[in-house]
Amino acid sequence: MTALVAPFDSDLQQAYGPSACLCPCRNETLTLVLSQDRTIDLYELERLLESVGWSRRPLRRVRRALEHSVMVVGLWRHDPRMPRLIGFARCTGDGVIEATIWDVAIHPSYQGAGLGRALMDYVLAELRRREVERVSLFADPGVVDFYARQGWDLEPLQRRCAFWYAT
Amino acid sequence: MTALVAPFDSDLQQAYGPSACLCPCRNETLTLVLSQDRTIDLYELERLLESVGWSRRPLRRVRRALEHSVMVVGLWRHDPRMPRLIGFARCTGDGVIEATIWDVAIHPSYQGAGLGRALMDYVLAELRRREVERVSLFADPGVVDFYARQGWDLEPLQRRCAFWYAT
């Protein structure tokens, strides 16, 4: 991925912040940008997450969850007036030893073009920069191969994931 | 579990803080206390984690990880002068939607007495109080049954856990 360097991309840098970088894309007519700085519209995020089949959650809870995440990344289809959020991921964690990735989503219209891989590369590069030791996630059956191909260890040491739901 | 109520247990409350409660124990000669408030000595924590077979980590990183955890719980064997840390658990998360439990440990000398169960009950009660929707953890093979007996869902919807390690 290419960092945005002023003065060539000063407009993009201004729109997406210092953490922004261009996201590689096979379609050269598109400008796609990854950023942790650009504010995410919660309604747009909910539409994105619904587009990949996830259920709606109360916006005030989503807002608080994002505020307390250690990293929030948007993938934007650039448009000078109205950038569109087409990808998303966030992490919780202690900032040092453990990070856990949640809500990885690429809008269905943009899937199959390597953007999920680019998004994960961006997230892992940032966690590596912060010197986080270990990153974890919970993979739905349909994306297990996606993570395995990227070198993730599935259930190392026969660890199993367990969930408890508030009722 | 019994909340500590002044004036009966004012000494305990003072030593362990407002979050403290007595931990049930079959051996009535012991007073065991769960608390989020009492400061954890990092050397004592490392000894506890080593006693259950976990590798040593740099203390400055452990300190930062604890500071950035959303919950840190100690299980103490009470002694008026020198309480001993015999159990531990911590959570990361966004405080609203997701919490992940790490480093659940009971000192081997105190295992088999229901203390792990009591520790987990305390953690889940606190997360429920905070209205966290979902709690996750990664269970080593030896403790999968422990969590299954407590009603945790193992790999719901065939989710699998994946790990990435910084190199």
Image: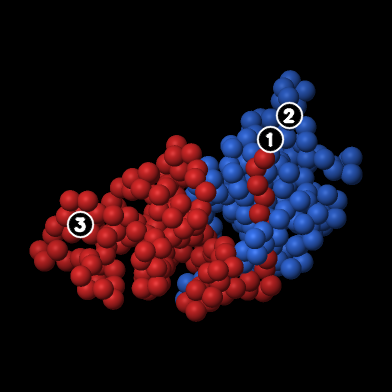
Chain colours: A blue, B red
Q: Is mark 3 on a helix, strand or loop?
A: loop
Q: Mark 1 lies on which chain?
A: A
Q: Quarter of the image for the C terminus of chain B: give it.
A: top right
Give the amino acid at mark 2: Leu
Give the amino acid at mark 3: Asp
Observer able to see residue A149: yes
Residue B136, position in %: x, y?
A: 54, 64
Q: Name the residue under label 1.
A: A20
Q: Mark 2 lies on which chain?
A: A
Q: Do labels 2 and 3 share a chain?
A: no
Q: Do the residues labelled 2 and 1 touch (CB within 8 Å)?
A: yes
Observer able to see residue B14: no
Q: What element carries label 2?
A: loop
Q: Name the residue under label 3.
A: B79
Residue A41, position in %: x, y?
A: 61, 50
Question: How far is the residue under mark 1 from the one under mark 3?
Answer: 54 Å
Q: Marks 2 and 3: which is nearer the front?
A: 3
